[in-house]
Amino acid sequence: MAGKVMHMVTRKGRYHARLVIPKHLREILGKTELRTPLGGDYRQALKLLPGAVAQLQHQIALAERKAGAGQPQAIPARYPLAPDQLAHSLYTQRLAFDDELRNDPRWPGVGINDLLVQRLRFAIAGKANDVELGDLVGAQIERFRAAGNTSAERGSTEWREIARALCHAELEALARAAERDEGDFSGTPASPIIRDAQPPEDAPKPVSMKKLWNDYVTNVPVLPILLSCERRSMRWQGSMWQRQIPPTSPRSASKRCRTPAGQGRNQSPTCSLAWRLGQ
């Protein structure tokens, strides 16, 4: 069974893109999270998800700028994505936009610019300068920057790598559009940077203290007599802990864990593991 998709939640059979707002921006946006409906079809929701998440990230980025009082600062990307992930996001956004355009009656008058295809291939080959790359995908890079996905400075090696990756996405999207014009909607990207892109990793889930304690008891080697005393002491005393000096040897530990007079063999001793917990 597939795992949960990052930034996508289900509510009453409908899918939504969801992004948690950082605490210091919640007062500005007036809420704790942002959501965008994606519909009830799972496959269609997956297609719309990257574009919806980008829009939500853009809203958070605008709020962050407002919180910074408009002062320009070199802030690292809040939601950094690798160049191939940026390219895959742009590719899926272009295909989703293509679907919308085909429902418009003016769509038959729109064709593919052969000159644009040639310029994109020229840029992918590394033959375009920064100005030409900026003309082709500069606006897309800035949108990803506003969404917090990149902090690459224009003209840097990282910026050029991202620009070339986005040119791959634009060219692949144009290829799918040409195939769809012929009635073929089964095309898949041929470029490895799009085809092999890995989805962003989700944050690790929090671990409960109870699970940490159980793992500790199971995996950490301790003296059997101490382990037995600790478990029985926890059941017998409940939430009441006693401060005791830790024993210096197994013999002294066994002496401290004697059963008081009047208690049976199976009843809990008075020893405590408060010293083990640093209390």
Image (cartoon, helix red, strand yellow):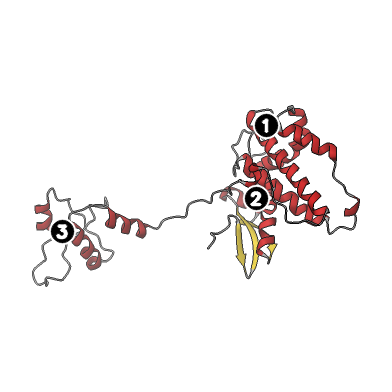
Say which amino acid is labelled 1.
Arg
Say which amino acid is labelled 2.
Ile
SS for callout 2: helix
Q: Residue at x 62, y 67 (%)?
A: 11
CA distance separating discs 2 and 3: 57 Å
Residue 269 appearing in the image: yes
Asked if marks 2 and 3 touch (Cβ < 8 Å), the reply is no
Nearer to us: label 1 or label 2: 1
Q: Is residue 170 left or right of residue 207?
A: right
Could you say which quadrant of the image residue 125 lies in? top right
Q: Residue at x 71, y 43 (%)?
A: 169
Pointer 1: what residue? 160
Could you say which quadrant of the image residue 61 lies in? top right
Asked if marks 1 and 3 touch (Cβ < 8 Å), the reply is no
Q: Classify mark 2: residues with Cα within 10 Å, few (<14), some (14-19) or many (20+).
A: few
Q: Residue at x 76, y 56 (%)?
A: 185
Nearer to us: label 2 or label 3: 3
Residue 67 appearing in the image: no
Pointer 2: what residue? 28
Q: Nearer the viewer, residue 222 or 62?
A: 222
CA distance separating discs 1 and 2: 34 Å
Dot placed on the residue nearer the N-terminal end, 1 or 2: 2
Percent x, y of residue 132? 77, 30
Dot placed on the residue nearer the N-terminal end, 1 or 3: 1
Say which amino acid is labelled 3.
Ile
Q: Classify mark 1: residues with Cα within 10 Å, few (<14), some (14-19) or many (20+).
A: many
Percent x, y of residue 228? 19, 62
Q: Is residue 204 left or right of residue 40?
A: left
Q: Nearer the viewer, residue 170 or 27?
A: 170
Percent x, y of residue 277? 27, 52
Pointer 3: what residue? 225
Percent x, y of residue 179? 79, 51
